[in-house]
């Protein structure tokens, strides 16, 4: 049986790699820290550009009858197989836990693959001698539809200078 180790492929445990690698930026918890770091700031801008490109939202004036959810930035440093920094990833997510079932949404759905299914697929690939490739679909969640109207605060650090008191009106599902 050909294994990764026999093929010369080694993937260090990221828990230990982070303790010795000095060039990997720390995953941040605050927007202020991210905006001051050029790599994290670029990741945030890339995320916003993807949202704009997919016409995920538009700015609308605020009114008293809107149920408004907040948003937050989530930061992740992605490592390659050798434990080196691959890219910095910033995601803008809505704070959906402020919504009420039946008022703001009817049902939730999150398509995920179960671990048992992955094991079966990998077992079949090994038996058949298939090559396995990893695929990262950028912004795949932007293609889902949303039936409810969602109003969200503008993202911290990127509030519109022309419409600072407006809200983001969602036309698509954009949270991960």
Image (tube, grey):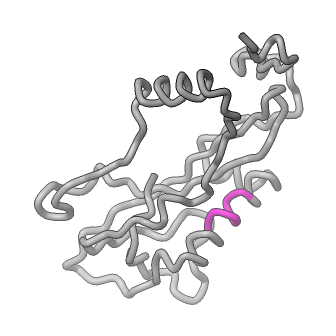
Query: Residue 47 falls in which quadrant of the image?
Result: bottom right
**151 sits left or right of 99 in the view:** right
Q: Is residue 132 above or below residue 99?
A: above
Magenta stretch, overall SS: helix
Give percent across and percent down for residue 26: 73, 35
- Residue sitting farthest toward the front: 128
At x 40% / y 65%, what residue is drawn?
A: 144
Give percent across and percent down for residue 147: 25, 72
Give percent across and percent down for residue 96: 33, 54
**108 sits left or right of 134 in the view:** left
Query: Residue 104 falls in which quadrant of the image?
Result: bottom left
Span of residues in magenta: 43-48
Quadrant housing the N terminus: top right
Q: Is residue 21 above or below residue 159?
A: above
At x 46% / y 25%, what residue is drawn?
A: 120
**122 sits left or right of 35 in the view:** left
At x 73% / y 47%, what residue is drawn?
A: 88
At x 83% / y 20%, what residue is drawn?
A: 9
Report the front residue among 137 and 7. Answer: 7
Residue 176 in magenta? Answer: no
Report the front residue among 74 and 33. Answer: 74
Q: Is residue 111 above or below residue 118?
A: below
Report the front residue among 64 and 115. Answer: 115
**103 sits left or right of 158 in the view:** left
- Count the numbered circles shown: 0
Give percent across and percent down for residue 100: 17, 55
């Amino acid at each position: 049986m050909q294994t990764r180790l026999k093929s010369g492929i080694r993937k260090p445990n990221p828990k230990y790699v982070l303790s010795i690698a000095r060039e990997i930026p720390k995953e941040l918890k605050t927007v202020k820290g991210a905006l001051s770091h050029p790599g994290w700031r670029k990741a945030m801008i890339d995320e916003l550009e993807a949202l704009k490109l997919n016409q995920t939202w538009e700015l609308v004036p605020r009114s008293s009858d809107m149920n408004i959810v907040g948003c937050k930035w989530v930061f992740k440093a992605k490592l390659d197989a050798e434990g080196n920094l691959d890219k910095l990833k910033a995601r803008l997510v809505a704070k959906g836990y402020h919504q009420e079932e039946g008022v703001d949404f009817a049902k939730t759905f999150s398509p995920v693959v179960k671990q048992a299914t992955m094991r079966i697929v990998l077992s079949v690939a090994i038996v058949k001698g298939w090559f396995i490739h990893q695929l990262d679909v950028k912004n795949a969640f932007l293609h889902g539809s949303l039936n409810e109207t969602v109003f969200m605060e503008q993202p911290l650090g990127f509030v519109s200078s022309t419409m600072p008191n407006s809200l983001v009106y969602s036309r698509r599902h954009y949270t991960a």
